[in-house]
Amino acid sequence: HDLCGHNAALRQELVAQPGVIPILVEAFELKQLHVLHAVMNVVNMLIMDNQKFLENLALVGLLPIVVALVVTPPDNTTVALPELASLVRLEAAKFVEQACVSSSWTLQMFIACGGLPLLTNFLSTDDDSLHRIALTGISCTFSIQAIPKNDTCRLFVKLGVLPKLIAVYNRLVLAIFKQHTMQLVDELHKICDIFLLFSQGDVVVKEHMCDLVVLEGLLYSLNPGTAIAKHDAYSMAMVKILKCIRNMSMEPNTLENLDRAGTIPTLVQVLTDESSPQIKDIQNIVLHAMFYLCRINRNRQTHAAQAGLIPYLQRVTQTRSPLKQFVLPIMCDLASASATAREHLWACDGVTFFLTLLSDKFWQIDAMKAIAAWLVHDTPNQYAPFLYFSQSYYFAQFCWRFQESLKIGNFESHTPEHIQQIVLCFRTAEHQFENLLESLLEILSRSMRMNQALGRSSLFVMEILYRLSYPKPFVRKNLLKMLKCIFESHTAPVQFLVEFNIHPTILALAQETNQILIQEIASQLLQAILVSASVF
């Protein structure tokens, strides 16, 4: 070993001699630890930069011998000489590392000899050197083209690699936090790359990734000190972890665990901290993840609002960022998520936000639905726990706040600006027109003041009358309901009838025989008109 250690030419000459391989193999039959340690030293020296010799050793069966040596060193002297046994194991592990990195052929032979359980067991030790070898070996196994990456992931998760991997990851992150050093950054990136591969697996792999122990470890690393967070190398590693979370959030079966682990508040904190040098990538990834986390589920939408997501989402919508396509669905869903979510929207001037959104032809439907949902969901039933107050008081308070946000006022002199926005949206809608009607009908039904404000807008009423000639029956049905709702709430119904000459139009619809439902609604409205005319 001393002769050949620093002499590559001598090493090459030695391995070229006949009989070297049999002698080395026979040497492993000796059970003394000091002999095995010396033999492993020599073998590791000879395979240095010599892929062919390593392959020859593997071919004659040395790999399973070394694997067995790593798993269970000779037991005669292990108890008496634990340090020497550890050194033998470490040298054997170095041989394993060379088998993994030298060639695809030796790597496959190593896997065939039980390599995956061995690499997993390396992670269970307290030896940092074995951890590094395990990470290198695990990374190499994913490079084998003959085995699909997902199959490799499935095999590893069955062996329980993820809890052991996260334990090593936590130690690594903690060392970086405490020492404020980036010397371990290469290992950090290597383990992040491994997690990223697992996060791209199928539903079984992702469910293992969403074990609470694993998730808590990943989320913990996203909240370093300011100095560490600003370091480019650490920030790039965290981008990979965020990609893991985004990938997991795309699987419906993982969402509950992600929420339970506190993913949403952690992501919001990451999103709002703009000190990272990778902030653009981070915001892109996090908003994708938030979109999947908040989709459909009202509890998670509420958690996002409570975590402070709304102000950031509003800032994104004020830009031309392509991320708006992920941000706006979240914002619009919050209006129907819960009373808590709506309170947070109130605090961020959500009504004005949705009204402004009405001018965007791509999002006006969702914005109108959000406004309607606000009125639909915040009914007296929401305040049932406060029975010592009148329920109607709470509903009145809500309606007052909502309508004050719309700046309706007493609408005596002019149509308020925000009401004009609703009217303009209704009048200019083309292909989206049909989808606006249900929401508008809800708004007219739920708020007397908004009903009366819209009823005083000649542009709004004339548009309803104009659109009554629309060929689709369900559209005409909703328009008639809207007109009926406005008429029944109008403060001057006769003046309303005269101003817009409504009677002939409704009479014609009431006499139609093709559409029974339209005829019925028109007849009801006609009856109300006749009653009003007789009273006044």
Image (tube, helix red, strand yellow):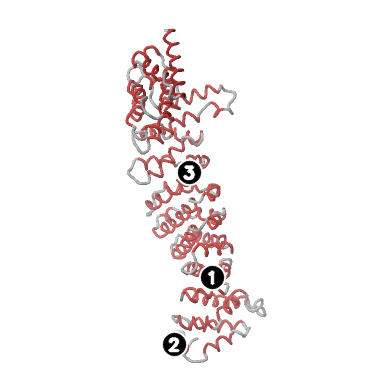
Image-based side of 92 in relation to 468, left or right:
right
Q: Tag 2 or tag 3, which sits nearer the N-term?
A: 2
In the rendered image, the quadrant that contains the C terminus is top left
Q: Amino acid at mark 1?
A: Leu
Q: Amino acid at mark 3?
A: Arg
Numbered circle sitting on residue 12:
2
| Residue tagged 1 | 130
Residue 160 percent location from the top left of the image = 58, 62
Residue shown at 59% from the left, 25% from the top: 387
Dot 2: element: helix
Q: Is residue 249 above or below residue 509?
A: below
Q: Tag 1 or tag 3, which sits nearer the N-term?
A: 1
Q: CA distance from mark 1 to mark 2?
A: 28 Å
Choose between 496 and 388: the one closer to the eye: 496
Q: Tag 2 or tag 1, which sits nearer the N-term?
A: 2
Q: Quadrant of residue 62?
A: bottom right
Numbered circle sitting on residue 295:
3
Q: Residues within 10 Å of mark 2 (few under 14, many from 20)?
A: some
Residue shown at 58% from the left, 62% from the top: 158
Residue shown at 41% from the left, 9% from the top: 533
Looking at the rendered image, the disc whose residue lies closer to the viewer, 3 or 1, is 3
Q: Residues within 10 Å of mark 1 (few under 14, many from 20)?
A: many
